[in-house]
Amino acid sequence: MRDLVNILFVALAGALLVAVPGAVVLRVLRRRSVVVNVCVLLAVTVLATLAGVIGVAQGMFIEEHDVDVLLIVVTVAGAVSVTVGLWLGRRLAADAMWAAEVRAKERQVEASRRELVAWVSHDLRTPLAGLRAMTEALEDGVVSDPETVADYHRRIRVETDRVASLVDDLFELSRINAGALRLTPASVSLGDVVSDAVASASPVAAARGVQLVAAETGWPTVAGSEPELTRVVGNLLRNAIHHTPSDGAVTVTGGRDDAGGWFSVTDGCGGIPEWDLPRVFDVAFRGAPARTPDPAHDGAGGGLGLAIVRGLVEAHRGEVAVANVAGGCRFVVHLPLAA
């Protein structure tokens, strides 16, 4: 019994000689990575066991052969433990980083959702108030001369188109975010898509005095869904025309490189502040102090056009980017080539 008590105290003393400094080291390293902390913890545990074994052996409580066996067992177990701890620490660190990224993304999505609701509420309130005022005026007979009535009818149609366009954008964005977008992949000629989009946008560009120029050759054939790609080009063209001043030009070019097929839309907006470039494709982002204001536009649209562009391009396994160039900015879309 006396030997057992001595063994207990010797083993405890040896373990404490390692555990106490190890606890200090762990406290110092508490702000370091998870991998470092896990490895140090396992090393302290193994060394504490080894110190206890050596202390008991030095007290002549264990035979020399048994000491050798114990040292071999503890050394092997320690090496395995530290190796496993290193692997586990990396896994824990990766999971922690993934969880942090998920939380950050959730906060960003929630902030974007609140911002979108605020923008859409504002954008709907203005045309709906105008529609109510004009319909009440027509209903109450406040306006009766044919010319004014015809003007009210025209303005009601314009405001209705604005609301319908905003609702369409919201529906498209909700399909993208919900993963409900179903593409019909095929071999699509970017030249045909751009030609149709340019023809559709030409009246708007002419009304604003903006020159619309598209390359005639060099267009690749890409893998994608034609309706969605047409919307991508159309959104980029409308955005470029809207932010290009009168007598300016919007240029559309395309080609192929090592990354696949591409097309670009270059406008004359005057450039986007560098700190705003990463946010250009965010939902409801319309912060454009360097861009040309459009009083006629009056903020229509919830800042969804470029967000839809990014969603549709990524659904095609492509990429979209923007950069400032001389006198404006250039949007470039990369898409996979058709087989």
Image (cartoon, helix red, strand yellow):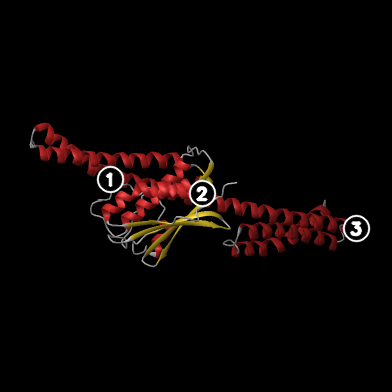
Real-space Cα distance between discs 1 and 2? 31 Å
Most extreme residue toward the top is: 139
**Rendered view: 64 above or below 158:** below
Q: In this view, does 244 lie to the left or right of 331?
A: left
Residue for badge 3: 63
Q: Which of marks 3 and 1 is in front?
A: 1
Q: Earlier in the sequence, mark 3 or mark 2?
A: 3
Helix, strand or loop at label 2? It is helix
Q: Residues within 10 Å of mark 1 (few under 14, many from 20)?
A: some
Vertically, is 225 above or below 280?
above
Q: Tags 3 and 2 in contact by the CB under 8 Å rule?
A: no
Instruction: Name the residue: 62% across, 52% down.
Output: 92
- Disc 3 is placed on an element classified as loop
Q: Residue furthest front?
A: 216
**Residue drawn at (46%, 39%) of the image:** 178
Q: Name the residue under label 2.
A: 102
